[in-house]
Every structure is written in structure tokens, then in C-alpha cells.
Amino acid sequence: QSFQDTLRKHCVGGYVHMRGHSAAEAAQLINELGVHVLVNLNGWAGEDRLDVFTHRPAPLQINALGYAGTSCCTFIDSLLSDAVSTPPELRRQYSEALLLLPPSHHVLPHKKLYGESQATPPYPRELLGLPPPQQDLSGRGGPVMACFNRVKKLDGKTWTTWLEILSAVPGAVLWLVRLALSPETEQRLLENARAAGLGERRVVFTDTLASSEHIAAK
């Protein structure tokens, strides 16, 4: 709610919330309002409204911030990104024209929100339930493979491949994050790993850090 209040405060030309509108209704309203540049902040990251963009309600339609990859959509004209997230040498792999900002397309008010955060030392592996660094080939310790995406992006083929890699690499651990993850889903994944013959702590879930801790840990 506070984010919407901030938007309303700064949108001197008006603020229109389109939740509940169908794609056709939203597109018609955008067109009637005379929007020149329509920006999609989610891409394929979930809860997007790309269906609105298919109606071409604005002359220029852009992806920005939420998804640095190509949309592969002919109705998205440009991608606002930077040369790190979107290497210009891969330009031919993108359906959009690239608008690359130096040095980064992410504008985040870290200093305003957190001040001059002092970097914290690395979290000990054991605190996170992870094995110590691998010292030799005796099985002591092991490599950590991590994926911090939302689990809902995971398909069965990828999950099966990860379990096969864990089975083939003694001591290896898969580290996942509890991001929009229900306890039931976490339990099902752990049971699936055990059914594949993997022992306890071969798949590790940890909670996300508070934003201030996350910034400091960087």
C-alpha cells in the first residue's frame, strides 16, 4: 500500500489501477489515455500482464527491470537493461532492440534505505546447514550447488537432473531458498530426494535474509 501511495503522490497526471481488468479492457483504457510508452516490469517472471501487450495499446512497448532476458515477443519493441545483464555481443539472440544503460539498469535506493551498511563477514557454512569446503577426494566436505530462484520455476526434468548430479558427486549438496515456498512443497521435494537414495542434508533449504542483512552481506 505504501508503494502505491508513493506512486499516486508522484503521478501528477493521474494514477489508474487496472487490477481486475481483462487484457482487452486494460488495453482499451491504455489506448484511450494516450499512453505513448508502455513498460512491462515483470517480463516472464510471474504475475505479468503480457496479455495486455498483445493488443498493442501503445506505440512503443518496453520490458524493463524484472526480466533481463528476451521475451521472444514481437509485440515488445525494446528491452531496457545493461551490458552486464544483457551482453551486447548476444544482441542477435534478442527479439527486442536493446537499450543498455551504463553502468546498471537497476536503480535501487540502498543508501537511503540502509545508510552506509558495513559489510559483514561471510556466513559460516555450518550455520546454513552446508558442508565444509571439500579438501580432498575422500568424501570429506563437498561442493555446494545453489539455485536461488523460486521453486515454481523448476520443472521435473531439471529436478531429476539435479538429483542425478548429487548421486554422482559424493558429498555434494543442493542449496535452495525458501522463497514463496510452502512447507508442503518443501517436504515433497525432500521426500523425493530421499526416494532417489540421497541421505539427509543433501538438499538444504534456508530462509531469505532481511533486506538490510542481504545488502550488508554483499
Image (spheres, rainbow, N blue to C red):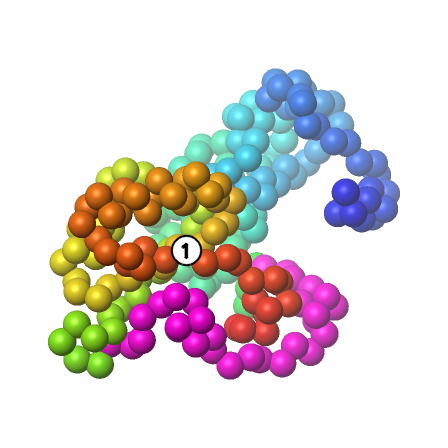
Q: Which one is in front, 88 or 183? A: 183
Q: Residue 103 lies in what quarter of the image? A: bottom right
Q: Is residue 46 above or below residue 175?
A: above
Instruction: Say if residue 144 shows up in the picture.
Output: yes
**Left or right of 199, for residue 60:** right
The image shows residue 80 at horizontal and vertical percentages of: 54, 51
Query: Which residue is disc 1 drawn over?
Result: 205
Q: Which one is in front, 41 or 211? A: 211
Residue visible at 58% across and 40% down in the picture: 40
Residue 169 painted magenta: no
Magenta span covers which residues?
106-134
Q: Is residue 24 above or below residue 72?
A: above
Residue 108 painted magenta: yes
Amino acid type at mark 1: Phe
Residue visible at 22% across and 81% down in the picture: 135
The image shows residue 185 at horizontal and vertical percentages of: 41, 40
